Amino acid sequence: MFSEKLLKQIDFIREIDKVKYIQRKTRLFGSDRNENDAEHSWHLALMAIVLAEHSDEPVDILKVIKMVLIHDIVEIDAGDTFIYDQTKNHSNSTEERKAAERIFGLLPAAQATELIALWEEFEAGITSEARFAKAMDRLEPLLQNVSNNGGTWAEFGIDYHKVVEKKKQIEKGSASLWRYASQMIEESVEKGILRKQAQH
């Protein structure tokens, strides 16, 4: 009665509901509730729409939105990797690759191929769309931590130098957003919510 294509698409839609259960370390703005991956991805998509004019290069905004909406779907299998994790690399891992192939592989072949390619493009961070998408991904938790008096920086003893090292990715997508982010980081040090040296 229904096409195999539709049934595969519905299977994928059911599977990605699990993204709503993946808790991130960062908390909602001015809140003690942890954000989940679905909320994070939704927020990045709207940020991309609103902030698109600040990209250093012209971008296909629909492509950016697709990237930020799918970039963390692999965490259904691989789990969330905290950006400041010292023991686990935050780069494209074998388990994330297997997750991408399994989850996107639920879709009809053409859609699976498209979404895996988009996920790979985001991870590589080379195209203008991927650079801007990654800038959104690094900016949102910065805004959250500032709103929460240091948030995960305070909780995990993350210092100024580590924050700058991780957030500098923003500059690859937008010089103006990096200037804004840099000022927020400096102000966070002045306010005492970000330490220049890590706590031991």
Image (spheres, rainbow, N blue to C red):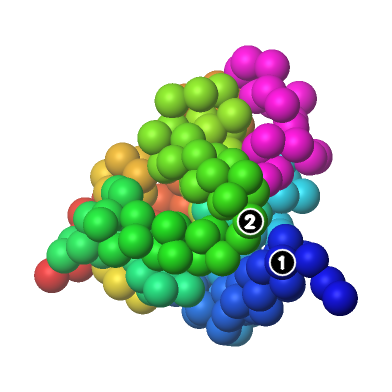
* Image quarter in which the N terminus is found: bottom right
Is 24 in front, or is 103? 103
Whether residue 166 appears in this view of the structure is yes
Name the image quarter holding residue 104: bottom right
Expressed as whole percent of the image width and height from the top left, the position of residue 107 reads: 62, 60
CB within 8 Å, label 2 to label 1 = yes
Q: What percent of the width, then of the height, locates residue 61?
A: 74, 32
Determine the secondary structure under disc 1. Answer: helix
Q: Is residue 62 magenta?
A: yes
Amino acid on which the number 2 mark rests in the picture: Pro
Position of residue 129 relative to residue 149, above or below, is: above
Q: Few, some or many C-alpha atoms within 10 Å of disc 2 (few <14, some 14-19, many ≥20)? A: some
The residue stretch that appears in magenta: 49-68
Which of the two residues, 74 or 132, is positioned nearer the viewer here?
A: 74
Residue 84 falls inside the magenta stretch: no
Who's the residue at 51% across and 24% down the image?
A: 127
- Measure the C-alpha gap from mark 2 to mark 1: 8 Å
The location of residue 147, given as percent across then percent down, is 61, 64
- Please tell me whether mark 2 sits on a helix, a strand or a loop: loop
Chief SS of the magenta region: helix
Q: Which of marks 2 and 1 is in front?
A: 1
Question: Is residue 136 something that shows in the picture?
Answer: no
Give whichever of discs 2 and 1 has the lower sequence position: 1
Mark on residue 4? Answer: 1
Residue 108 is labelled as: 2
Res. 130 mark: none
